[in-house]
Image (cartoon, helix red, strand yellow):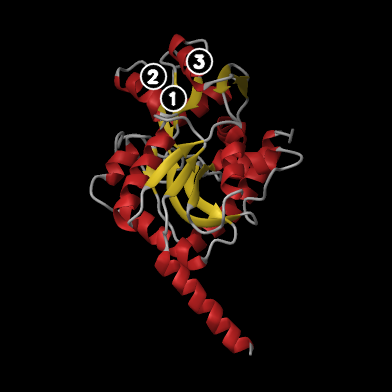
């Protein structure tokens, strides 16, 4: 009887996957239209529209560090017609930094595919006598407490803390409410360093107004091939990762998530897509649902440890 029931369930699942999608699919994005994550989501939506036979549209749901977008995803049927373009903010910061988390990133979501890793550049003011990571750390050790480092988010705070703790240097953290003001003050020389996104830093790097010491990506960034990774620059690896990934509500049939994962990875492998995504400061990195699920669990541990070491307490 159990064997017969299992066979029936398998047939029903296969039938659902064959019929999928039966209506338009929406990708809920927690960022405003025109931003880097939104642009990648829209490119992916166009690619999926071409292969799924149904329109795939992006719906922007802003607010709450991704909580509003996550809630909209979890309120939808678990059938693959509603997907969540999530980042480390929604999947790491929110669950770990709230005393009463609104959701569990492992239990409440079905992983589909990693999409890419965000690129952050360690940039410094030309007023600082350091043109490389080794010179930066040597100067910091010779001048304890005299280098200030801007942070504007929990992710930038965590990256700063990992450099500070791993190198054993006394660097003063200066909190900002946004990335652009922090970069402006590095340009002005009142702040010495910051981890910045390519969108805000690249024009100033290319004009020579900012020095760039390293990238947080696992490999060198093709746009700036001479810039080393933090590891290549002589630092221990930054264990937390900054990523974008696609999720569905928990309970979405495995055949559906695997088909979606296959199509996402096929889109990422298309000629020109890597360059398109790279321009938005995201390095392409696809995965299977199982690989993304394991990645989320590993990163939750890394982020929890990082927050604790940085002294960042849940609110």
Residues at marks 1 and 3, CA–CA distance in whole angstroms: 14 Å
Task: State the SS at label 2.
Answer: loop
Q: Secondary structure at mark 3?
A: helix
Position of the C terminus by quadrant: top right
Residue at the farthest bottom position: 1
Q: Is residue 142 shown left or right of residue 200?
A: right
Image quadrant where one finds the N terminus: bottom right
Of the residues under marks 2 and 1, which one precedes in the sequence? 1
Q: To which quarter of the image does residue 72 belong?
A: top right
Q: Of the numbered discs in the image, which one, if any, rests on residue 123?
A: 1
Residue 164, horizontal then vertical, whole percent:
59, 32
Q: Residue at x 49, y 49 (%)?
A: 83
Q: Nearer the viewer, residue 293 or 157?
A: 293
Q: Residues within 10 Å of mark 1 (few under 14, many from 20)?
A: many
Image mark for residue 181: 3
Q: Quadrant of residue 15?
A: bottom left
Picture coordinates of residue 211, whole percent (x, y): 39, 22
**Element under label 1?**
strand
Please tell me how crowded label 2 is: few (under 14), some (14-19), or many (20+) other residues with Cα within 10 Å.
Answer: many
Quarter-wise, where is residue 173 in the image? top right
**Residue with the mark numbered 2:** 210
């Amino acid at each position: 009887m159990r064997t017969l029931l299992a066979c029936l369930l398998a047939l029903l699942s296969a039938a659902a996957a064959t019929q999928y999608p039966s209506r338009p699919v929406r990708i809920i994005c927690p960022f405003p239209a025109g931003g880097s994550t939104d642009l990648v989501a829209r490119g992916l939506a166009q690619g999926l529209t071409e292969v799924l036979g149904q329109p795939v549209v992006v719906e922007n749901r802003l607010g709450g560090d991704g909580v509003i977008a996550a809630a909209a995803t979890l309120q939808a049927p678990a059938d693959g017609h509603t997907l969540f373009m999530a980042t480390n903010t929604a999947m790491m910061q929110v669950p770990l930094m709230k005393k009463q988390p609104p959701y569990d990133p492992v239990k409440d979501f079905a992983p589909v595919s990693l999409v890419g890793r965000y690129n952050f550049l360690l940039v410094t003011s030309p007023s600082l006598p350091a043109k490389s990571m080794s010179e930066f750390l040597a100067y910091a050790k010779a001048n304890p407490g005299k280098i200030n480092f801007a942070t504007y988010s929990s992710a930038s705070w965590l990256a700063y803390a990992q450099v500070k703790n791993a190198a054993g240097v006394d660097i003063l953290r200066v909190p900002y409410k946004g990335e652009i003001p922090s970069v402006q003050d590095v340009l002005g020389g009142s702040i010495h360093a910051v981890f910045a996104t390519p969108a805000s830093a690249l024009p100033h790097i290319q004009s020579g107004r900012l020095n760039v010491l390293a990238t947080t990506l696992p490999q060198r960034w093709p746009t700036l091939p001479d810039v080393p990774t933090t590891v290549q620059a002589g630092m221990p690896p930054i264990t937390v990762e900054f990523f974008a990934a696609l999720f569905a509500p928990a309970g979405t049939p495995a055949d559906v998530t695997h088909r979606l994962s296959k199509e996402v990875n096929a889109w990422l492998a298309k000629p020109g897509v890597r360059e398109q995504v790279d321009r938005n400061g995201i390095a392409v990195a696809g995965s299977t649902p199982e690989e993304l699920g394991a990645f989320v669990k590993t990163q939750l541990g890394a982020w929890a440890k990082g927050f604790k070491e940085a002294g960042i307490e849940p609110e």
